Amino acid sequence: MKHFSGLIAVTALAVSVLTLASNADADGGRYFVEGSIAGAVGQHDDLTFVNPVGTAFTSNAIDGNNIILQGVDDLYLSAGGDAAFGYQYNPNISIKAVYSYLGHYEASGDANFGAGNFRQDLDTDAHSVMLKLGYAHPVTQSFFVEGTLGAGVSILTTEAKQGDNLGDDNALLSNTNVNPAFSVAAGVGYKISNNLSTTLTGEYVYAGHTETDTTTGAENAATGINVSEQLNADILIGRVLLGLKYHF
C-alpha cells in the first residue's frame, strides 16, 4: 500500500506540472530543464531502538519499549543530485517537477546486554520527487537571487544490523518508507546566456520517517534477535547544489 500511495502521489505531481504548463499563457514563459550535483549532510534524528523483550536485559536506560542508545552518531556526509523539468511563467516565477537522489546516510548507537556494547547500525538511501515553486529576483543584468519551496514524497530504503562491531551478523528487516516531504532553498544564479544559467543553492529537506520492518523473532533466532525489534528515525538533510538550467 505504501508503494501504491507513493506512485499515486508522484503521478499527481507530474499531472499537475503538465496541467499548469498547458493552461499558462504561451507568451508568459518558457520550458526549461535543470540538472544539479549536490553535497549533503544528513541526520537520522531521534534514532530509536525498539526492543520490548530486550529492555529487561540491557544496562542502558529505557523508555517504555525503547532502549536509549549510547554513543549515538547520527550525522553523515553524502552526495547526490537533481533532475528537473519546469515552466517559467514570467522572469520571476517558475514551477518545476524535480527528482532528487538525496544521498546515502548512516547512523549508529550502542546497546549493552552484558556481553558488551552491541552497536545498532541504520543505513538509509533517500530519494524524493517534488513540485517546487521558485521566485527569482534580478540583482544585476546577469546575477540573480532565487528562493524555492517544495512539497512531494520521499522514498527511503532502510537496512539495519546489530553487533557488527563484535563480529556478529544480525540483520534486522529492511523496509521502504514513502512519506510526505518538504524543502526550502535559497541561492544565487548567473545568466551565462539568454538560455543558459548556473546556480549555487543551499537547501533544507525534511524527508520524513524511516524505519526497519518489525521482527517476528524467527529471522535470526540463533543470534538472539527478539520479537518486535525495530530501528527508526526521522531524516533531515542539508544540501549545497551546483546547477545548470537551460530554457527552450
Image: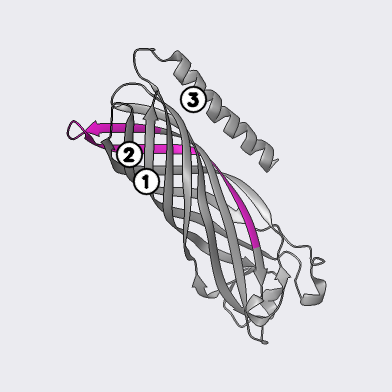
Q: Which residue is mark 2?
A: 198
Label 1 or label 3, whichever comes before in sequence order: 3
Asked if marks 2 and 3 touch (Cβ < 8 Å), the reply is no
Q: Is residue 40 left or right of residue 53?
A: left
2 or 3: mark nearer the eye: 2
Is 161 drawn above or below residue 57 in the view shown? above
Q: Position of residue 40 (x, y in %)?
A: 43, 55
- Look at the numbered disc 1 and give the secondary structure of its residue: strand
Label 2 or label 3, whichever comes before in sequence order: 3
The foreground one among 229 and 166 is 166
Specify the quadrant that holds the N terminus.
Answer: top right
Q: CA distance from mark 2 to mark 3?
A: 23 Å
Is 43 drawn above or below residue 132 in the view shown? below
Specify the quadrant that holds the C terminus.
Answer: top left
Q: Amino acid at mark 3?
A: Val
Label 1 or label 2, whichever comes before in sequence order: 2
What residue appears at the point 53 percent right and 49 percent down from the top-left corner? 208
Q: Which residue is mark 3?
A: 17
Q: Amino acid at mark 1?
A: Leu
Asked if marks 1 and 2 touch (Cβ < 8 Å), the reply is yes
Q: Position of residue 234 (x, y in %)?
A: 52, 56
Q: CA distance from mark 1 to mark 3?
A: 23 Å
Residues in magenta, as a range: 133-159
Packing grade of label 3 (10 A; few <14, some 14-19, many >=20) is some
Packing grade of label 2 (10 A; few <14, some 14-19, many >=20) is many
Q: CA distance from mark 1 to mark 2?
A: 7 Å
Q: Position of residue 89 (x, y in %)?
A: 35, 21
1 or 3: mark nearer the eye: 1
Residue 242, numbered label: 1
Is 76 drawn above or below residue 118 in the view shown? above
- Look at the numbered disc 3 and give the secondary structure of its residue: helix
The foreground one among 97 and 190 is 190
